[in-house]
Amino acid sequence: MLEINKIRLNKENVIELLGVKNFKDADQKINTLIDLDEKKRQVQKQLEDIKADLNVKAKEIGKFMMQGEKDLAEKTKQEVAALKENSKDLEKELSEKEKEIEELLLSIPNLPHSSVPKGKTAEDNIVELMEGEIPKLWEGATPHWDLCAKYDIVDFELGNKITGSGFPVYKGKGAKLQRALINFFLDEATKNGFDEVQPPLMVNEASAMATGQLPDKEGQMYAIPLDGFYMIPTAEVPLTNIYRDTILQEKDFPIKKCGYSQCFRREAGSYGKDVRGLNRLHQFDKVEIVCIAHPDKSYEQLEKMKQHVMGILSKLELPYRILRLCGGDMSFTSALTFDFETYSAAQERWLEVSSVSNFETFQSNRLKLRFKNQEGKTQLAHTLNGSALALPRIVASLLENNQTPQGIRIPKALVPYTGFEIID
């Protein structure tokens, strides 16, 4: 959530930056917001004046009573009663204005960083780096969904029978590959200074609101109305909410957490080749990294998180590229996002496997996540997160890129985790 004071002081710049995100009606919404804030401040001033007047009159009543001036005391009491009634009306009006402002703020996305390119779709993203060689497959190579059936390692039909499409069953070496990747990702994160946490798979509404899943993404989340819970779309939500309503010390930074979780996404409206096999699932495994940083150091931490993901992909021997997302392809909450894509040789296309983002103060404002600076004043921290990594498309790329006539080769870095060198 944007900070109202910064909006008021930088109105034109805010409207311009929202334009980079292709946010409709930015001018109208920001002007409405500033107008509401001005009215709220006027009501607040009236309320403060009344409270000050009440304090004065309370002292006057005591003085009049001591002096035996009962008529003046009674008259002042009546004035106090009128002021209290007026203050109740103003408190109600103030509460209504604050609610209107919050609802409007919740509908406005985060401002993009100055380095975010303009654009409307993924076609406008900028390729910043490309590493590794695109593998040349043997003549009998097939997409991963055929490999899964051939080696009986992922059963999509069985998952559909048990639950529905998008809930695959991992079997044999497929299940062991999943477990190996999870342990490998967690170990790599730990080596890079991230403390491991095993978070809940469900969160309450306050947690979903704090990290920006609500009210923006409620249509993509699985809800449990009876209990007021939501299945997590990513471990980012519970990991970041560890620090909701928290005041940190400057010496605490950077705070780095990692966590494995299953993730649940409805993925409404997805269709075609994007959903074939492991390309897009409703339930999948992911290791998430989260960082809470000092505002002056958050982009330094973002770069370190990028380097971390690059290191993992290199160890997996996967060709990858990094995209700087344009304004139109960024999330509602992000200030700057880098997407990582691996090349899927059998599908002959790039698959997104990670997003690394800086949210600046957008999440922390909702979280009320602050720290005491060197002057002893509290200010909002910056929050960052990244996938390190999401498993389904990593598995798809590994299966396709490493297939041979003898079977599917396992990258050397994973062999100590799988206990086997080939799927055959």
Image (tube, grey):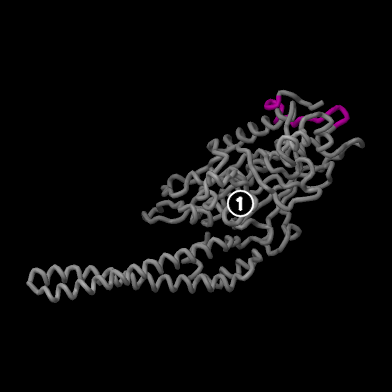
Which amino acid is tagged 1? Ser
Percent x, y of residue 33? 51, 70
Q: Nearer the viewer, residue 209 or 223?
A: 223
Q: Nearer the viewer, residue 282 or 381?
A: 282
Above or below 93: residue 1? above
Percent x, y of residue 387? 64, 44
Above or below 92: residue 130? above
Q: Residue at x 59, y 43 (%)?
A: 231
On screen, residue 171 versus residue 226, left or right, reads right
Question: How many dots with numbers?
Answer: 1
Q: Nearer the viewer, residue 66 or 319?
A: 66
Q: Residue at x 73, y 41 (%)?
A: 166
Q: Circle 1: is it few (<14), some (14-19), or many (20+) Cα within 10 Å?
A: many
Please indicate, yes or no, whether residue 80 appears anywhere in the rendered image. yes
Q: Residue at x 25, y 72 (%)?
A: 53
Q: In the image as oriented, which residue stretches furthest toward the right?
A: 139
Please indicate, yes or no, whether residue 393 appears anywhere in the rendered image. no
Question: Which residue is denoted by mark 1 in the rendering?
Answer: 357
Q: Quadrant of residue 399?
A: top right
Span shown in magenta: 404-418
Q: Residue at x 38, y 56 (%)?
A: 377
Q: Nearer the viewer, residue 5 or 106?
A: 106
On screen, residue 13 versus residue 130, left or right, reads left
Above or below 152: residue 309? below
On screen, residue 225 versus residue 73, left or right, reads right
Percent x, y of residue 103? 52, 63
Callout 1: helix, strand or loop? strand
Q: Magenta stretch containing residue 326, yes or no?
A: no
Quadrant of the snapshot with the C terminus:
top right
Q: Magenta stretch containing residue 406, yes or no?
A: yes
Percent x, y of residue 321? 73, 48
